[in-house]
Image: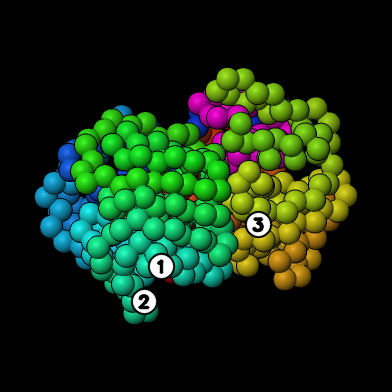
Amino acid sequence: MDSYKLLITGGIPLVGETYVSGGKNTSVAVISATLLCDEPCVLENLPDIEDVHVLIDILTGLGAKVDYQPEAKRMTVDPRNVNTFRVPYRQTQRMRASYYMLGALLGRFGQAEVGYPGGCSIGARPVDQHLKAFRAIGAEVKDRGAKITAKGKMVGGSVVFDRITVGGTINAMLAAARAEGNTTLYNAAREPHVVDLANFLNSMGCRVKGAGTDTIRITGAKKLHGSVYTVIPDQIETGTLMIAAAATRGDVVIRGCIPTHMESLTAKLLEMGVAVSDMDDAIRVRTVRGHRAVNIKTQEYPGFPTDLQQPMSAMLTRASGDSVVIETIFESRFKHLMEMRRMGAQVQILDQTAIIQGVPELYGAPVTATDLRAGAALVIAGLMANGVTEIYEPGYIERGYEHIEEKLRALGADIRREPLEDI
């Protein structure tokens, strides 16, 4: 249980300029990929978030030397002394992306023993497609419930995913990076962080082609050399800041982002009546009229991201009219809306569909974050609401957003931490 709660006094439009940190989803993939290298690697633009710190603990536990400088957003990883292929359950339970250790250690040693991954409770997130990929390129895999073991000589092959899976695509790329011969991934994920991982692997001497399409071809390398690599900006943080600016009827310029990654969100905000303008590496969001209700259906990239469904549906609670939100990726991603009912939101939830009837205003209330993006959604709700909102279990937010409170305060938000009272 977290030792503090967030207090937000809402009703203040966000105004000013802010910046986007390095991508959470790309960072956890690229940090894991350093295990494949035979020399030290330098990673830049890393966000100072909990998931990065968890990976540092895992890497050092494996024997790697890690020098992380949060202020400089820079990490040096020397994997040369990694001497074990085992990652214990107590470490993997701290984050979902710990399953990337499977692909990275398979690629390095041809062997891996990794505890089952943890992370946010947003529904079933099976790893069957990951294991299918490992088997297709030479590994004998056993799912033992609390841990997964894999062993075998990595030899290139064809992997046909039964469904699009970002984690499975990344894990297959990691395992294939040092496999003998060529590996082809069909029905691969196209997310920006998949492309970023491919670029990092290429910078170390691997040959990855087709990232960003549904077919990725990987030519394994016997050795990978060190690299200095800068990770891309965080697509989901960009979207969360865009939604926060629009939801508070503000006027915010978000710098250091990639506007083309945000096209699905931008289209929906424009449909709602929000003014959105793009620059080379910045986006301006401002509200010039009331918000109209819209319908949203989450899809794999380049569709509307499931990770932005929760912040966006929070904003829709005050839009004029009825909005329909269909969640196709995870089955437990409406918990934030149930919390927001305490704030006056009018919501009906039926299976994977939420019908949101916009209300004139929300009211501050005690609410609890149940996962990372739910926490971000409740922050947005608190920024919109009249009065004070108390958010409990805010530690989830730290898993994926770097210094979000400071960024919001710099834009005028009244948000602060308060220690929990002893019970």
Per the model, the C-alpha gap separating discs 1 and 3 is: 44 Å
In the shown orientation, is residue 190 left or right of residue 365? left
Instruction: Say which residue label 3 marks.
Output: 365
Crowding around mark 2 (Cα neighbors within 10 Å: few <14, some 14 to 19, many 20+) is some
Foreground label between 2 and 3: 2
Foreground label between 1 and 3: 1
Crowding around mark 1 (Cα neighbors within 10 Å: few <14, some 14 to 19, many 20+) is many
> Colour mode?
rainbow
Q: Are marks 2 and 3 in contact (CB under 8 Å)?
A: no
The residue most toward the right is: 321
Instruction: Say which residue label 2 marks.
Output: 143
- Expressed as whole percent of the image width and height from the top left, the position of residue 8 reads 59, 45
**Front residue of 34 and 255:** 34
In the shown orientation, is residue 318 left or right of residue 107? right
Instruction: Say which residue label 1 marks.
Output: 131
Q: Are marks 2 and 1 in contact (CB under 8 Å)?
A: yes
**Front residue of 124 and 272:** 124
Residue positioned 31% across, 47% down in the render: 220
Q: Is residue 339 visible?
A: no
Per the model, the C-alpha gap separating discs 2 and 1 is: 9 Å
Q: Which residues are magenta?
A: 237-259
**What is the secondary structure assignment of the residue under circle 2?**
strand
Q: Please name the amino acid that badge 2 sits on.
A: Asp
Query: Where is the N terminus found, in terms of image quarters?
Result: bottom left
Residue positioned 44% across, 52% down in the render: 184
Identify the image quadrant of residue 419: bottom left
Per the model, the C-alpha gap separating discs 2 and 3 is: 43 Å
- Expressed as whole percent of the image width and height from the top left, the position of residue 144 reads 34, 79
Q: Please name the amino acid that badge 1 sits on.
A: Leu
